[in-house]
Image (cartoon, rainbow, N blue to C red):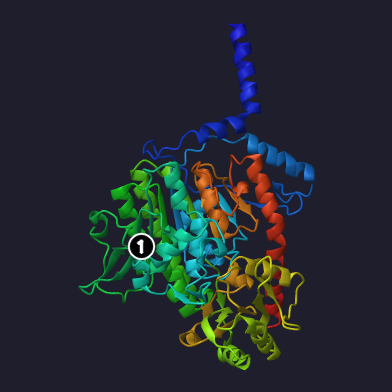
């Protein structure tokens, strides 16, 4: 008996020493999509106060704000060794379109608060791409990659043949134009990698009225892509993108339609969340990807985002109730404790106090002796010109106007190693160090044959307007920090609880992190796994995140400093 106890003791010691590796190996062996198991209080409200955690840009070590490197190392070591088997089999990823991080401080949102307290929150979540728009942001989430790799630059651009492309059309989305672009791009998709690992798994993407968001979020490989539209009988109800159609029982389920599109604030988002719950009841899909559009319009553009605090309260408290209902659907299915929840946005949002007419750009193009093939104007302007050799002259003409609300101007030049963006002499007016390098990083995310010929980056709280935008109170699309900054919360099995990280987490890191939690390789994606959020992160994942952080920290530091100085200067 004594010998047996000694043997058990030795085995226990070995298990403790190798616990992280053993747990990771066990976790990787379970790839099924089966339901089952008794739900636990995974998402119950925690009673302890979340600890603010720093991700050191120099050492790359995770820890509290305690200043010694030794304690950082000890915390990281204990964190890895304490890893346990992750039973995550389902994912619910919700994009609150254009939501600002401050919205998550809204009172009386207990279910959102529970996710915060039982998961990891990133205070420096950001788009990390240009354009910081809805189609490109959702495609970055889906592909874990930049627009240069997934092919979706925004709503509009000109392709390598200088022919205009526009995806702001329900008919074009339904005809498969976005799917075709993403399918021909080198970046993989979330659904594609999940299907590669498990062909029987199902991925559902959906939105309220934003057909282009649902399609970018699901991509060509999603099983089902749904959104809301006007029906032939005049009602407003769900439909599906051809080739991504669910069982008829999903679209025809009761309670999913309203009399018309003129509904009170929050009803559209409520319908989308209800459609998500209905689809899970009928299909039991492994991954559910949801876009909630009303945070962007009307709250963001029409009402000025955080300027409309009653609107923020209406949408966030309504979302909290819908989140509770969706959680209950998973709880009844017996899989809530096996489900990851991700809350984020697709881009930032800034309140607008200064508007500059796009005529400034038009005149610069005409004076350079060329014409515009395609252009888009928001908190940055993006212009594709007919004669690309004239791009430098266009940029110089814009810079020569010395508009007080233009921060910087760039133009694209072809080189032997590929296109690069340059600035005309005296074009850029920066108040903080490192902003040009930060802008260059963001420009690189869409740099390629389809990238714009001229880029005009506006200062914080300023935008270029071309028409209907003249009445907007809020906008995004550019490089300024408020246009980039967004919320990111990850909660569920295998995720650190009560944890707040200031790591600069870009959109392209979401898919690799979700796939890691599902034990699916993120092969081909440009993003990194957010290792500091995981209880079972391996050394390679931590090293990759550390390396990525060395690139991203200087970028967001410069953008935040420039935003602060521009706001203080009221420019």
Q: Is residue 473 above or below residue 220?
A: below
- Quarter of the figure with the N terminus: top right
Q: Is residue 240 above or below residue 570?
A: above
- Residue visible at 46% across and 80% down in the picture: 302
Number of numbered discs: 1
Q: Which residue position is annotated with label 1?
A: 272
Q: Is residue 217 visible?
A: yes
Q: Is residue 292 visible?
A: no
Q: Is residue 2 above or below residue 26?
A: above
- Quarter of the figure with the C terminus: bottom right
Residue 127 in the image, given as x and y percentages of width and height: 57, 64
Direction from residue 34 to residue 107 in the image, left or right: right
Residue 318 in the image, given as x and y percentages of width and height: 40, 64
Q: Residue furthest left?
A: 233
Mark 1, other Cα within 10 Å: few <14 / some 14–19 / many ≥20: many
- Residue visible at 76% across and 83% down in the picture: 425
Name the one closer to the observer, 421 or 302: 421
Q: Is residue 58 above or below residue 411?
A: above
Residue 196, located in which quarter of the rendered image? top left
Residue 518 in the image, given as x and y percentages of width and height: 48, 43
Direction from residue 275 to residue 526 in the image, left or right: right
Q: Secondary structure at mark 1?
A: helix
Residue 436 in the image, given as x and y percentages of width and height: 72, 72
- Residue visible at 67% across and 89% down in the picture: 397
Name the one closer to the observer, 458 or 120: 458
Name the one closer to the observer, 497 or 99: 99
């Amino acid at each position: 008996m004594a010998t047996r106890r000694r043997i058990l003791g030795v085995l226990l010691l070995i298990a403790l020493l190798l616990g992280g590796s053993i747990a990771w190996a066990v976790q990787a062996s379970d790839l099924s999509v089966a339901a089952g198991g008794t739900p636990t209080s995974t998402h119950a409200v925690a009673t302890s106060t979340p600890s603010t955690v720093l991700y050191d840009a120099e050492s790359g070590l995770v820890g509290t704000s305690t200043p010694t490197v030794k304690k950082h190392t000890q915390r990281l070591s204990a964190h890895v060794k304490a890893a346990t088997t992750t039973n995550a089999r389902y994912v619910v990823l919700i994009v609150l379109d254009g939501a600002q991080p401050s919205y998550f401080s809204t009172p009386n949102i207990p279910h959102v608060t529970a996710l915060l307290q039982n998961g990891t929150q990133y205070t420096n979540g950001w788009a990390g791409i240009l354009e910081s728009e809805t189609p490109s942001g959702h495609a970055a989430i889906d592909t874990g990659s930049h627009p240069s790799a997934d092919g979706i630059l925004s709503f509009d651009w000109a392709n390598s043949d200088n022919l205009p492309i526009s995806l702001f059309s329900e008919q074009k989305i339904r005809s498969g134009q976005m799917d075709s672009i993403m399918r021909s791009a080198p970046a993989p998709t979330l659904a594609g990698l999940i299907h590669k690992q498990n062909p029987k798994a199902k991925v559902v993407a959906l939105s309220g009225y934003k057909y282009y968001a649902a399609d970018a979020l699901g991509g060509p490989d999603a099983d089902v892509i749904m959104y809301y539209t006007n029906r032939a009988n005049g009602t407003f109800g769900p439909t599906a993108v051809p080739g991504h159609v669910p069982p008829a029982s999903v679209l025809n389920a009761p309670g999913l339609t309203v009399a018309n599109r003129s509904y009170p604030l929050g009803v559209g988002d409520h319908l989308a969340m209800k459609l998500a719950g209905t689809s899970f009841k009928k299909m039991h899909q492994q991954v559910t990807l949801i876009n909630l559009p009303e945070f962007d319009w009307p709250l963001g553009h029409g009402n000025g985002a955080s300027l409309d605090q009653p609107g923020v309260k209406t949408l966030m408290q309504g979302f909290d109730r819908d989140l509770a209902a969706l959680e209950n659907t998973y709880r009844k299915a017996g899989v809530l404790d096996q489900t990851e929840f991700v809350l984020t946005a697709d881009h930032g949002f800034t309140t607008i106090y200064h508007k500059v007419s796009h005529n400034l750009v038009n005149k610069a193009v005409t004076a350079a002796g060329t014409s515009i093939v395609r252009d888009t104007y928001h908190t940055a302007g993006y212009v594709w010109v007919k004669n690309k050799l004239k791009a430098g002259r266009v940029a110089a003409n814009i810079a020569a106007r010395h508009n007080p609300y233009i921060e910087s101007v760039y133009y694209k030049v072809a080189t032997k190693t590929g296109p690069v963006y340059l600035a005309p002499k005296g074009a850029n007016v920066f108040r903080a160090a490192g902003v040009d390098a930060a802008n260059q990083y963001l420009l690189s995310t869409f740099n390629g044959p389809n990238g714009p010929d001229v880029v005009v980056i506006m200062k914080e709280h300023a935008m270029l307007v071309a028409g209907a935008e003249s009445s907007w109170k809020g906008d995004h699309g550019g490089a300024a920090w408020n246009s980039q900054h967004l919320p990111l919360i990850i909660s569920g099995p295998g995720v650190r609880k009560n944890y707040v990280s200031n790591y600069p987490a870009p959109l392209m890191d979401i898919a690799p992190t979700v796939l890691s939690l599902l034990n699916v390789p993120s092969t081909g994606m440009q993003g990194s796994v957010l290792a500091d959020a995981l209880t079972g992160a391996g050394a390679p994942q931590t090293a990759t995140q550390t390396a990525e952080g060395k690139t991203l920290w200087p970028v967001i530091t410069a953008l935040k400093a420039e935003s602060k100085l521009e706001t203080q200067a009221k420019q």
